[in-house]
């Protein structure tokens, strides 16, 4: 064994040598596994949040819309809001896929036509202020609550045309006066564009029922045209030039590459407020003010908080704020913050049901226009 | 074989001494170093965040002070008190005066009771109005004695923090004072207590991001933190992006967050470990080299010593260890050489002694045949006999005297003819004693007469033949025949008496030198011859077939 007692006597057996080598190897392993010592959790409780104080919102709105509102909600109620944002269809699809096991409590935003198609995923709820809300587009089964309304409007570049030359109606739009000068986004990709197109078709085929009289004599001529013919006429007036996204519409008009644009009131107001040289026109023959909405997701884990949210966004404060500061139109009937316009009631069912067909026709028209003509 | 285990022991010892302490101290050093540095690092961060938080807090206090001053200022109150407030230069001057100390840190705006802005220190596009039913002004209105602080709500507004207080008169609100700070303002407040290597974030009560500096923005710190809080994750734990510290800013319900890069990333740790392992490997290699060299150095002299010892084992004591080392092993070698030398000397001495002893024994034996006084007495006897006229006595004593003279002479060797003479005198005596009852004859070639033989070797043999051989036989014969048998001087003494007994022959052949009375002479002669010439020579005895015995004395033929 290992004796180092007496001076000079030193003998290591084989076993000890091996033992020493093993120890060395172990220490090597130790060295490789050097790690920072873990800190203890102190004051962890200070930062914990109880579930009662949370709300998870999936939103299709832009930050300039939802941030102030959510911030106000937090301040008012003390509830912490977790936000997931994205496009309308993206968010709705997400909720659908999560199917009851959803992270979301609220779907905030999205046109009522879209919300309607997903109504099976929503928990029915009637807002505290339902009686003060415009019932034109109320959900049949209270799947959603309307939030703000977005009328389709025309915009025109004030440098390129003057007030008298402005497009006053849909029929005027199709008259050929603005051939090739119309900025319009592809309805396949833009929800608001699709709505605008359906609005146009509805207005022009319904013009016999509309209450106001158009000054343009040729408007009556469109009564007899079928939808397909109207589409064709529209494409003709566009000269086949369709923009990729709705944001391009206002950009093109402001830049002067197009004279006229079809967009929503919010976009128009915002840009006008920024000082762009454009003006807004509400089509005299009627336009749809399709609202967006807010819904409680089925299986929401924070149901009470979700209900409080719906009440909040349909309350006077938020509705006034969005009207005065966010360039939107309130859905409340007791605020006269917005100018009145000639509205038609948009046929949601028709728009939803016939969507695939119409878009198909649209694409064919586009292709044929690019090909020949 | 031995060498291998010695090397292993050396190597193990070296490794124990070199690598183990290296590794152990290395590990402890690294751990202690890291713990220490982490500690200091954290301490620094904590002091930084403390400083940042209190700096922000004190600035906000100054804001509050200025705002309160504005809200109670008579000029401002007068302006707001009017139904249609006029915003003249007087009110502007007052505004600027009361807020000079915060010129670089924010802007002040006074709003009327409906939220329309009246005067402002901002040069850019100040908000023309703010809602009073929504947001910070609502809060200011609801709590008129407090100053509300919030993240700026309007998306288009470049400011990040707003502070608002309601201007009250007679318990009615007549306007609002709002201070706003943008990113640059906040950066300059923070610049005195923090540096750009940190990630700095300011959060509101609900941990929405108010402010993020460049680094924090690029790592999305605010979003990450809020996410972690919402999901109940521990915030103090270091993550890949670093380690975070959070402090509330006074009682504003806002918080400031400081993030620092991890000092000891997995990378750094791995590098340190690798360096240490490299050093250990180098050390191990060195140990191997040195162990190899050392064991060679130490075992070589041992091998040399082994070789020398082997030689000595087989009888060659002249083998020496060749060494000029100055250490213990050299010492060992030199000691061995000395020992071998001493041993050699000792051996030679012993051989020498033995030789001397033998010679003395021979001398002693021969001295037994040397009675000095007898010789003198005999001489007296001879003369007395002669004068008294008894001639036989004279013959006896003179013969005996001559015999004794030879015996005393001291010479160890004599010529053969002298020896024969002596025998003849002896016979003369014996003839008188035995009245001529026997006959004696010697035959020797003349050329052998000058051979050198040891003194008194013939007489005892002849005596033996007469006394034992003839023994009371009348008319016996003794015959001595001397010849050269191939270099061996052969002296045959034969008698025709009783034959020599077998046991006698045996005793002679076996060289049994027990003192046997009466045969002392034969044995002495045999011993003397053998001592001088070796065992090949000496006495031989046999019985003669025709009766009688023959004693043969063998010697080497030697001449002077």
Image (tube, rainbow, N blue to C red):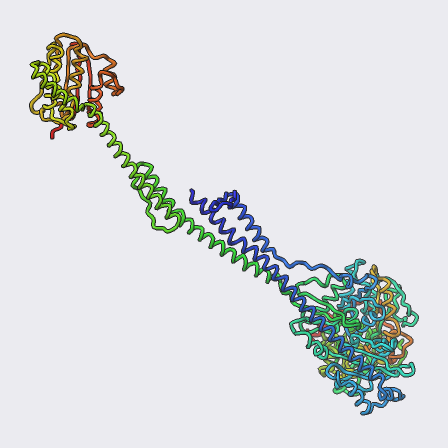
Find the residue positioned furthest to the top.
B474
Quarter of the image where one finds residue B243: bottom right
Q: Nearer the viewer, residue B330 or A99?
A: B330
| B53 horizontally vs B83: left or right | left
Residue at 50% x, 43% y: name it. Answer: A14
- Give the number of callouts: 0
Asked if A158 appears above or below B499 in the picture, the reply is below
Quadrant location of residue B62?
Answer: bottom right
Residue A350 visible, this orientation = no
Question: Residue A64 placed where, x, y %?
Answer: 78, 74
Figure quadrant of residue A234 = bottom right
Q: Say left or right for B393 vs A173.
A: left
The one nearer the camera, A366 or B34, is: B34
Hey, which residue is sitting farthest bottom in the picture?
B89
Q: Position of residue B213 (x, y in %)?
A: 69, 74
| Residue B237 seen | yes
Quadrant of the drawing holding the C terminus of chain B? top left
Q: Identify whether B255 is placed above or below B68.
A: above
Q: Is residue A302 above or below residue A220?
A: above
Query: Where residue B345 appears, x then y in whole percent?
Result: 29, 39
Please indicate whether residue B353 sits to the left or right of residue A104 in the image: left
Quadrant location, the N terminus of chain B = top left
Kindly identify the residue that appears in the image at 19 percent across and 11 percent down.
Answer: B499
Between B335 and B189, which is closer to the camera in this rendering?
B335
Task: Indicate whether B459 appears above or below A351.
Answer: above
Q: Position of residue A184 (x, y in %)?
A: 75, 76
**A242 or B507, which lies in front?**
B507
């Amino acid at each position: 064994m290992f004796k180092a007692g007496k001076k000079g006597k030193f003998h290591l057996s084989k076993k000890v040598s091996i033992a020493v080598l093993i120890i060395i190897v172990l220490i090597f392993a130790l060295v490789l596994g050097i790690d920072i010592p873990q800190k203890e959790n102190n004051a962890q409780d200070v930062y914990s949040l109880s579930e009662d104080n949370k709300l998870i919102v999936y939103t299709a709105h832009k930050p300039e819309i939802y941030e102030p509102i959510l911030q106000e909600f937090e301040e008012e109620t003390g509830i912490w809001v977790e936000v997931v944002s994205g496009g309308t269809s993206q968010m709705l699809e997400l909720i659908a896929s999560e199917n009851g096991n959803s992270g979301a409590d609220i779907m905030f935003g999205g046109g009522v036509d879209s919300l309607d198609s997903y109504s099976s995923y929503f928990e029915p709820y009637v807002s505290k202020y339902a009686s003060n809300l415009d019932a034109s587009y109320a959900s049949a089964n209270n799947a959603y609550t309307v939030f703000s309304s977005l009328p389709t409007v025309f915009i025109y570049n004030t440098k390129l045309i003057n007030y008298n030359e402005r497009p006053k109606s849909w029929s005027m739009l199709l008259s050929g006066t603005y051939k090739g000068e119309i900025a319009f986004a592809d309805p396949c990709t833009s929800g608001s564009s699709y709505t605008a197109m359906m609005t146009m078709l509805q207005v022009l085929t319904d013009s016999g029922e509309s209450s106001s009289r158009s000054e343009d004599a040729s408007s009556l001529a469109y009564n007899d045209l079928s939808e397909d013919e109207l589409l064709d006429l529209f494409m003709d007036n566009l000269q086949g030039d369709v923009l990729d996204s709705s944001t391009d519409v206002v950009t093109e008009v402001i830049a002067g590459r197009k004279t006229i644009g079809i967009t929503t009131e919010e976009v128009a107001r915002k840009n006008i407020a920024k000082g762009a040289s454009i003006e807004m026109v509400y089509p005299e023959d009627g336009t749809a003010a399709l609202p967006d909405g807010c819904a409680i997701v089925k299986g929401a884990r924070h149901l009470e908080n979700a209900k409080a949210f719906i009440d909040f966004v349909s309350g006077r404060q938020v509705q006034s704020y969005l009207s005065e500061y966010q360039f939107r139109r309130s859905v409340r009937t007791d605020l006269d913050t917005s100018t009145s316009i000639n509205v038609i009631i948009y046929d949601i069912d028709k728009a939803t049901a016939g969507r695939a067909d119409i878009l198909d026709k649209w694409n064919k028209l586009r292709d044929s226009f690019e090909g020949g003509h | 074989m031995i060498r291998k285990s010695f090397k292993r022991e050396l190597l193990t010892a070296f490794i124990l001494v070199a690598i183990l302490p290296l590794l152990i101290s290395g590990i402890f050093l690294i751990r202690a170093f890291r713990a220490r540095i982490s500690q200091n690092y954290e301490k620094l961060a904590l002091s930084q965040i403390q400083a940042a938080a209190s700096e922000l807090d004190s600035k906000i206090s100054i804001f509050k002070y200025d705002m309160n001053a504005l809200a109670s200022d008579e000029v401002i109150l007068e302006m707001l008190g009017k139904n249609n407030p006029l915003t003249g230069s007087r009110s502007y001057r007052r505004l600027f005066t009361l807020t000079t100390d915060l010129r670089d840190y924010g802007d002040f705006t006074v709003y009327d009771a409906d939220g329309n802005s009246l005067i402002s220190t901002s040069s850019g596009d100040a908000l023309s109005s703010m809602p009073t039913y929504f947001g910070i002004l609502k809060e200011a209105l609801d709590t008129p004695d407090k100053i509300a602080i919030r993240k700026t709500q309007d998306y288009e507004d470049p400011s990040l923090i707003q502070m608002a207080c309601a201007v009250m008169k007679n318990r009615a609100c007549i306007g609002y004072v709002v201070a706003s700070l943008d990113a640059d303002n906040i950066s300059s407040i923070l610049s005195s207590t923090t540096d750009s290597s940190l990630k700095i974030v300011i959060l509101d009560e609900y941990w929405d991001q108010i402010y993020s500096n460049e680094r924090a923005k690029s790592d999305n710190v605010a979003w990450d933190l809020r996410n972690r809080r919402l999901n109940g994750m521990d915030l103090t734990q270091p993550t890949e992006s670093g380690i975070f510290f959070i402090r509330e800013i006074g009682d504003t319900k806002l918080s400031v967050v400081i993030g620092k890069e991890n000092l000891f990333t997995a990378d750094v740790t791995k590098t340190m470990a690798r360096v240490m392992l490299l050093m250990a490997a180098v050390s191990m290699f060195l140990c191997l080299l040195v162990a190899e060299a050392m064991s060679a150095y130490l075992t070589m002299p041992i091998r040399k010593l082994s070789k020398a010892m082997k030689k000595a084992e087989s009888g060659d004591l002249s083998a020496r260890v060749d060494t000029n080392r100055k250490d213990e092993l050299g010492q060992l070698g030199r000691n061995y050489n000395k020992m071998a030398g001493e041993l050699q000397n000792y051996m030679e001495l012993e051989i020498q002694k033995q030789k001397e002893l033998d010679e003395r024994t021979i001398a002693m034996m021969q001295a037994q045949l040397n009675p000095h006084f007898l010789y003198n007495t005999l001489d007296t006897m001879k003369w007395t006999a002669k004068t008294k006229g008894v001639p036989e006595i004279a013959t006896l004593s003179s013969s005996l005297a001559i015999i004794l003279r030879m015996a005393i002479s001291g010479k160890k060797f004599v010529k053969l003819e002298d020896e024969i003479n002596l025998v003849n005198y002896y016979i003369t005596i014996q003839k008188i004693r035995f009245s001529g009852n026997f006959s004696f004859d010697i035959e020797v070639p003349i050329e052998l007469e000058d051979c050198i033989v040891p003194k008194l070797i013939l007489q005892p043999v002849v005596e033996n033949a007469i006394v034992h051989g003839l023994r009371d036989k009348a008319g016996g014969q003794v015959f001595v025949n001397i010849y050269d048998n191939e270099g061996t001087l052969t002296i045959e003494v034969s008698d025709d008496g009783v034959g020599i007994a077998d046991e006698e022959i045996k005793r002679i052949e076996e060289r049994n030198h027990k003192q046997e009375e009466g045969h002392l002479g034969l044995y002495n002669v045999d011993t003397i011859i053998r001592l001088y010439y070796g065992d090949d020579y000496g006495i031989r005895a046999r019985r003669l077939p025709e009766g009688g015995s023959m004693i043969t004395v063998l010697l080497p033929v030697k001449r002077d």
